[in-house]
Amino acid sequence: MKYVNEFRDGNIARGLAAAVVAETQPGRVYKIMEFCGGHTHSICRYGLEDLLPGNVELIHGPGCPVCVLPIGRLDQAIALARRPEVILCAFGDMMRVPASDRLSLMKAKAEGADIRIVMGSAEALRLARENPAREVVFFAIGFETTTPPTAVAVKQAVGLGLANFSVLCNHVMTPPAIQAILDAEDQGGVRIDGFVGPGHVSTIIGTAPYEPFAAKYRRPIVVSGFEPLDILQSLLMLVRQMNDGRSEVENQFSRAVSAQGNRKAQAICEEVFELRPSFEWRGLGTLPDSALTLREAYAAFDAERRWQIAYAPVPDHKACACADIVRGLKKPTDCKVFGTACTPDSPVGSCMVSPEGACAAYYLHGRFRDAKVG
Amino acid sequence: MCLAIPARIVDIQEDDRGTVNLGGVRVPVSLALIEEPRLGDYVIVHTGYALSKLDPAEAERTLALMAEAGITTAHPEGAA
Amino acid sequence: MSQRPLFPRKLDLENGRVDMSHGAGGKTMAQLVEELFVASFDNPWLARRNDQASVEMPAGRLVMTTDSYVVSPLFFPGGDIGCMAVHGTVNDLAMAGAKPLYLTAGFILEEGFPLKDLKRIVDSMADAARAAGVAIVTGDTKVVERGKGDGVFINTAGIGVAPAGVNPSGERARPGDVILVNGPIGDHGVAIMASRENLSFETSIRSDTAALNTLVAAMVEAVPDIHALRDPTRGGLATTLNEIAHQSGVGMVLREADIPVRAEVVAACELLGLDPLYVANEGKLLAICAAEDADHLLAVMRAHPLGSEAARIGWITTDPHHFVQLETRFGGRRIADWLTGEQLPRIC
């Protein structure tokens, strides 16, 4: 696979890792947050932490849309799915996340709700065309990477004159989440020295939105690709910035990301979506201007308006530490139920379900490290 | 969810549809988010949509920088 | 006086459909059995037209297995539910080191299922059985109302005989043993995905469904004391190795770079966010043997058509946690965990 395999080369990886080792200053701790769940997953999949020196501490961030979606939002999806006329289309990652009343999308499906796993909005649109007598609802989650595909689907629905397609919109935004992490530092949040910035989100939004954070909070941000060499190179760039006392936005993922991003995608999103004044996030609290809803012109495709769905906040399970984990305050192993009551088989919280969640990643990788197997 | 992977455009149809090839696997994708897609272009694909083009020159440059980082480093004692 | 033929009109295998009378136990069912199953499977046991089969068993340890097949779609690149049913049953027996001998085949048919498709499936089973050297000696037919079954479900049982001294079993892996696989993994699961309506990509990947009994026969002849054999079907290689690790009370380390995977399977898995280690196989086996036997066993496997790409992929360790670990290409390590279950429904 061109432009994939080259960025997984073991020899170059070892060279980059050696460079990180060589350039970290002994006695100094480098606390780096990788914002994006995709990076968490990649770090785990390639065992990258094993290659890093002990004073580079990777803190997993909130960039996992499954992890930051509060239970109340999932309950809305389940309630809709239970309506006999509805076909709810959801990403596979969401199926096993625990909701209220001991339910999940998977359990609701077993009880008879018509829930289909889709790979994207296009499939949901297809189901709407194939099932004119049913109401097809696309449970749209995701950061800015996934938002444009939803916008395209909505516009296509308009073009097709579909009367039975709607979106339950839970798209969230990256810069407000980064801001929330940085703002929380004064209130007992974790102090982050530098960020590995999201890669695919940045193909859409560009690197410009990160400039204010670098300037105001004086923290380096390196926008990174997802292959292991990308992540290692980004860590090297961050270490160098920290050693030099710089706080710049650097673009390691220059082959896919530009400063201004994908203007066409941005325009399509601008046309279809507008900001919600506020939105509750797991772990980050209720944030202003951090999530999207459909504009009035597209109200007919908004599931919330179509079915007059209200939002009722639902607290997480008492023992669940996901809220602290998504903002780096706790490690998965700090959670009382990690690996005992909460496992991928029987998850208590979302972080254990999503392949990008810190707990799921740590269960695969970190639990082995703690076990000190030879 | 962040699954996005570079693939080569091998066919362009009407209505912003196209086909990409990744390592011999052909997949239909939407090209609605791409400006002026061309056959042979590499694009990043996510949930059935091409998100952006990949710049081959930048890719080569990045790889060269990566390889260089290893060469210019003296051999350390080893990762901790 | 000339005898009237039992079935005055032949089954319309071209345009006919299964209806409720085909499962009712009467003449219509008898005709279906006669003109479709018996005609195709064509062996002396079925020719006796009893509800059971009397078979002669050679000396040795009797090995039995049972399986059900609910794969969707019924026909996929490289195979179908029929040949898969034969291969799967034969392979379960072979994994005990047994020579497979006799199979049963029970069919649950949905009302309305085209007889043309049923014949295609049955003929495929017959071909697979002949090629594997087994006979389908008895069976059963039931029909359920339209909507209550997914076209065809097949249940099988199989019996075979294992020689003395050949006893591969999941609890026999020992630290120091070597893990081998007979070829690239992930083909079946990806081939199924490609056929599914809601997954839209064309690949040249075919299911690897195959009977492994002749490969196993060659293997146990060369190394009678193979410690464990198992075919990594649903859940893939990683799940199967985790099962064995727990049964044997050991750990395992695999070298990621040594695990054979076709480039297109890698690409398809990337696109779908799947890990080939967890994707189903239907023509693969894992062998665990003593270190001193590994080279010889590998050579024997490679000499067989179903083992030409056989590879040594890892080794057994002492580990109280029974982890199956992966050495990544970068020398880092991660666990190949025992996951909850298959992400894709009904691929076997």
Image (spheres, coloured by chain):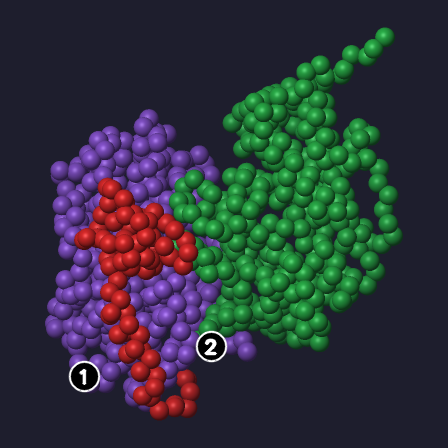
Chain letter for purple?
A: A
Q: Which mark is residue A245?
A: 1
Q: Is residue C347 left or right of residue A316?
A: right
- Residue that protrudes farthest toward the top in the picture: C1
Give me the residue at 40% from left, 35% from top: A114
The percent position of residue C1, horizontal first and vertical second, equals 85, 8
- x, y percent for residue A370: 48, 74
Q: Secondary structure at mark 2?
A: loop
Q: Residue at x 13, y 38 (%)?
A: A297
Asked whether residue A197 appears in the rendered view, the answer is no
Q: Nearer the viewer, residue A295 or C167?
A: C167
Q: Name the subunit of mark 1.
A: A
Q: Going by the image, does C207 lie left or right of A98?
A: right
* Residue at image location 40% in from the left, 73% down from the top: A9
Q: CA distance from mark 2 to mark 1?
A: 32 Å
Q: Position of residue A332 (x, y in %)?
A: 39, 66
Q: Colour of chain B?
A: red
Instruction: Give neighbour class at mark 1: few <14, some 14-19, many 20+ (Cα, 10 Å).
Output: few
Residue behind mark 2: C331
Colour green maps to chain = C
Q: Residues within 10 Å of mark 2 (few under 14, many from 20)?
A: some
